[in-house]
Each structure stands twice: as C-alpha cells, then as structure tokens.
Amino acid sequence: MFFLNLPIALAALLLLFWRVPESRDVEAPRHLDWTGAILTAAGLGGIVYGLIESSRRGWQDGGVVTATLGGAACLIAFVVVEARSPAPMLPLSLFRSRRFMGANLLTLGLYGALAIALFVLPLDLIQVRGYSAAAAGAAMLPLILTLFLLSRWSGGLLDRFGARLPLVTGPLIAAGGFAMLVRAGVGGSYRATFFPALVVLGLGMAVTVAPLTTTVMNAVDVAHAGIASGVNNAVSRAAGLVALAVMSMPLQHMFNVQIERRLTDLGLRAELVAEVQAQRMMLASAAAPSSASPRERVAVQRAIAAAFLSGFRLVALSAAGLALASAAIAALTIDAQPERGPSGDPARTRGTQGGKLP
C-alpha cells in the first residue's frame, strides 16, 4: 500500500520544480536545532502517551502521571530554549503576528476536529455496520472528491473576499457536517446518513484549506515562508494527535456507561455480563460470549452497537464544537483585507495557487 505513494510523490516533486517559486532565508544557520527537536518530540510524545494510557490505566497510575507531567515540562523547556537559541527551529517572533497566531489556532481546532471524526467514522462503518475495510475507505470519497474538485476554486476566495470570510465560513460549514453525523443510527442507509454529512464536511474544508495555507504564508516575511508552512503542518499533526488522545477518554467513558446500563436492562446472566465488560476497551469490536444463546448474542451485539453510537455522537458533537471555535478564532484574529508586508506590497502568495490539506 505504501508504494502507491511513490508515483504521487514523484508527480508532486515535478510540479514543485516546474511551478512553485523558491523562497530562501539567506541568513538562516546551517545546523539543526537538535535540542529543540528532542524537546518538542519528547513533550508531544509524553503528553499523548499519558492521555491515551489514562483511559486504560487511570490517572492514579504513576507511569501515566510521569509521562504527562514530563511531556508538559519538555514543552515548557522547548519554549525557553527557543527563546534563547541563536538559531531556533521555531522562531517565536513569528507569533507576534496576530494573523499567523490566529491561523494556527484555527488549524489546531479544525484539524483536531477532522482527526477525531475520521478516526471514529471507519470504526462505526466497519465494526457496527459490517463494512469491509475497502468499502469504509470508499465511503470517505465524497469528502475527498469535494475537497479535490473545489480547492482551486476556493483558492480564489482570498483574492475576491479577503481572508476572514472564507476562514469563518469554512469552519462553520464543516461544523454543520460534523453535526450531521449525529444522525447516524444503528440502521439507516449510507446515502441518507453519512453521504450528506461528508459532502457538507468536504465543502467546509474546501472553503477553508487554500485560504488558510495562503494566510499562514502571507503572515510572515518571505524569507520565513518555509518555516511558517512547516509550523502550520506541525500544528495540524499535533492537533490530530492531541485531539485523538483527549477524546479517547470521553469516548471510552461514554461507551462504558452505556454498555453497563444496557446490559443491566437486558437482565442477562452475571457471567455473560462479566465477559462483555472485560472487552470494554475494544469498543464496538467487542463480541458476545460464545456461551450466549442466539437470542442473547443478538441482544448483546445490539447493546454494544448502541453503546458505541452514543460515544460516536459525543465525538461528532465535540468535533462540531471545535469547528465552531475555529470559526470564532478566525473572526477575532483574521482581518478582512490581505495582509501587506513591511513595504506595503500586497500579499505575496496568491490564493489562486490552491492549498494543502496538512
């Protein structure tokens, strides 16, 4: 599967050398900031590990607490080191731009929302509805195709309307797509439930992605365009990691509460309930015990599916809330007109060049 990326990467490189102008910081140091790289990797790794393990081992576990606090300490040390380093991997001066700061906060919220929604959706399709892995992947095509077909058009929104309108409107539309996923039940057809939500979500992301990328690039000096793009990419990756780690806790908690209540309502034998409860960490892939009768097996599988859907809806609503927060951040931090450089020249990176999905 990974070899499928090679021709795509080759095509991207050819387009890069053919159509994309170079930007270079001639004053940039020629050595890597190893201290900063180690601290940020250890910081994010420790926090994400602690959050994920807390859902299984609890916050009373010494390893969970140590990893989380150690990760937080590494990130604090990273900021201190970058502020004092003569050649930082992340120049903190970039964040003096309100537009740059706002665009990255928007990225943090919106891509975090996208990550958690696209994590639980295949679980629902495969584990609850019985889709194959290939069918679950194909089910995502409305989102991908909408984003692909509309990205070039959406790039022109920045030239025509400025940055604020698309960066507020796009997350609002995406929030509607996330909220529409709440309609998913145990039954119902794909066409009536997931398809409209994914199309709306794709439209919201298409409106947002190209103007967001351009806004990030235009918010800094041309010599720092590369590091600005790198920061935005890193923020989008961190958003997905942290959002998944954080949301795994309420997802697991909701599933635990719901499965316990539903099994109690079924009045099953104590040993059957205990066997199902032992599989709670598996969420919707938990299975009815082999000792259950056919009637009990059907009832248990329905209870597992319904319990997972309760957690799924919680995640979808949380994603919608993050998208709404991203729209509010854009409204507060992004000005309507294209940002101008120190010389008063218009924005360098035009919206019509498209964008990226970090």
Image: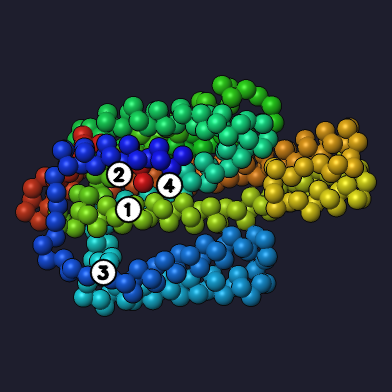
Amino acid of disc 2? Leu
Mark 1 in CB contact with mark 4 (< 8 angstroms): no
Which secondary structure lies at badge 2? helix
CB-based contact (under 8 Å), mark 3 and mark 2: no
Residue at the spot 28% in from the left edge and 39% down from the top edge: 10
* Residue at image mark 4: 111
Q: Amino acid at mark 4?
A: Tyr
Calculate the distance from the C-alpha at mark 2 to the C-alpha at mark 4: 12 Å
Q: Are marks 3 and 4 in contact (CB under 8 Å)?
A: no
Q: CA distance from mark 3 to mark 4?
A: 28 Å
| Dot 3 or dot 2, earlier in sequence | 3
Labelled disc at residue 212: 2
Tag 3 and tag 1, C-beta contact below 8 Å: no
Relative to 313, is 275 above or below? below
Figure check: 60 above or below 331: below
* Mark 2 vs 4, N-terminal side: 4
